[in-house]
Amino acid sequence: MKNNYVHTFGGIIGLTENSNLNFLNRQKVLVNKPDFKLFLPLEVPEYYYQFNSESFLWKGGSKIISKTQKFDYLTEDSKFVYITFGAEGCSVISDHYSKIPLLYIQKEDTIYFATSLTYLLQISNSKALDINYDGLSVYYHFGVNSFEQGLIENLKILSGGSQLTYSNKSISISKYFDITTFKTNWNNTSSIIENTTAIDDVLLRSTAKTVNNYDKIGIAVSGGVDSGYLAQKLNQSNREFNAYTIGYVDGYNEFERIDYLADILNFKAEKIILSAKDIIDNYLKVSAYSSFPLGYNNSIMNFIYKKAASDGVEVLFDGDGADRLFLGMNKFIQLKKFLKFYDRSKSLKLNYLVPTLLKLVKHESGKKLQFYFRKLNHGMQFYGERILLDKITFDLEFEEALNDLMLPNELKRLDKNIDKWLFFSLFSIYYTPTFFFHTPYELQLKHGLVSNPEFWSDEMVKLSLSIPTEQKLYQKTTKKVLREAAKIKIDNGYWSLKKIGLQNSYKYIKTKDFGKDFINSYVDLIKQTDEYLYLLENNIDGSIEPERLIPYYIWKKNMFES
């Protein structure tokens, strides 16, 4: 197991007789009580945290502005982990959306926790690691790490707005902040013009508040709506900033759009052009210090982080997560069509007949439509994130088991008649951190950078949930209301330029011989693993796609290496 943890902290709660004392003796110990220990690696800079006799505050790399300011975790919606301790026990509290990964393992009556998996495994003295096959199933079928079902036995992540408490020799986890309380059933009656103005005001306030605390600012720009909109807000905050963008050799770039935006907002963009070899070499490197199987597009952000750090940038903005709040992905248009089709069929009492008729459709889309119809017909909630094979088979028992693993208790408790898109949005918000925030957070801290997803303030999340689907998905346009908000202060010339869309880096490397060789070599290795055989035997379709396990295989190899 490698010591790749950087800028992390950890602790032990409960009965600690089995603590790895040799390891703890080499750490910066902040609290050393019989039932609670808190410590950091010696190299962690002091401005990364705030500590006193009653509490510990970790701001995810953000500098602590005031050591005397009272911290209110109930109203603070930036990145943080907050710990309180005293005679009555202690509490570990995640930020509202789990922007910082807080991993923990429970062994009998002891909890071990850390913001880095390698550090956590050292703390808990975990020498033999057992794979959690429920967590593996979630990862394979949904492409995401579950909060409750980690890839290692007993490994979990503290979800957003959670409080882990130890008191009277008892450990409990509760919610102090619940996104489902934001649900509004689309009761926002404002016009799209009024909502675009509201979005613009909220984003400006949030951005201006963040940049106040930093001297040198950077932003990753893709040529799309979200990052371009943030660049405009940085400009409107009267701050200069560095901008960075990525393109591929003989492949994707949005340089024309970014040059236009740079001209009207008065910034210069650093263009980073990557080959398939660059992407793969970097992927293998950064995977060595990632707590989770790394997404390919997340991994290439490391090139931007490295360049920004060399330029002295302290805080880096990006548009991650906005698509989840405002329904910005192209596949959502297809899902909207399906839901309209289903609701119409149900109103005509044909929803049970349609799956039978769809068997006559020879195209793979017929199989997927059957799958979704059967799922909804059995009263299962709609969240549309399952990764489906072209020849998907619906099996009720199998899907109910996956559903039970995937859905958090907060969503399971919701009314079965909740608006389908509202449920979808709540599900997306819940899992966005593990999709977009956790691994970039680790890569950023490796370079001494910090970011705070600016679209993820409580005010913006609440506003986004209140806006009806019709203002987000309008005809063939995704995130319509956000596009209109961005157009308020970015001229039409930018929007008329051709938009290609961010090319997936994995799809790009598949077009190159070097990338094909990389993929094929791992596919051969994966087919020899117990995990591949398990999924093959337990997948109702009788087949799996080994390529989807490449990030997992590389992650596991790093975690299990001595």
Image: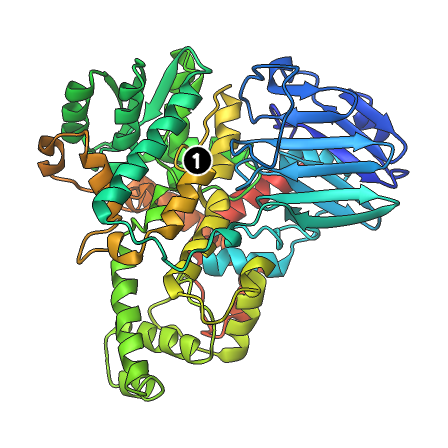
Residue 105 point in image, percent of width and height = 72, 45
Q: Using the image, determine if residue 542 lies above or below residue 426.
A: below
Q: Indicate left or right for 164 with 36 as reference.
A: left
Amino acid residing under circle 1: Tyr
Crowd class of label 1 (few under 14; some 14 to 19; many from 20; radius 10 Å): many
- Residue, x 58% and y 17% (percent of image)? 64
Name which quarter of the figure residue 54 lies in: top right
Looking at the picture, tell me which residue is in the foreground, 244 or 543. 244
Label 1 element class: helix
- Residue, x 28% and y 49% (percent of image)? 190
Residue 135 point in image, percent of width and height = 59, 56
Q: Indicate left or right for 81 with 519 as reference.
A: right
Q: Indicate left or right for 122 with 139 as reference.
A: right
- Residue, x 43% and y 22% (percent of image)? 209
Residue 365 point in image, percent of width and height = 27, 71
Q: Using the image, determine if residue 490 lies above or below residue 557.
A: above
Q: Is residue 314 visible?
A: yes
Q: Which residue is mark 1?
A: 283
Q: Using the image, determine if residue 89 lies above or below residue 314.
A: below
Residue 215 point in image, percent of width and height = 42, 10
Location of the C terminus (image quadrant) = top right
Looking at the picture, tell me which residue is in the foreground, 492 or 149. 492
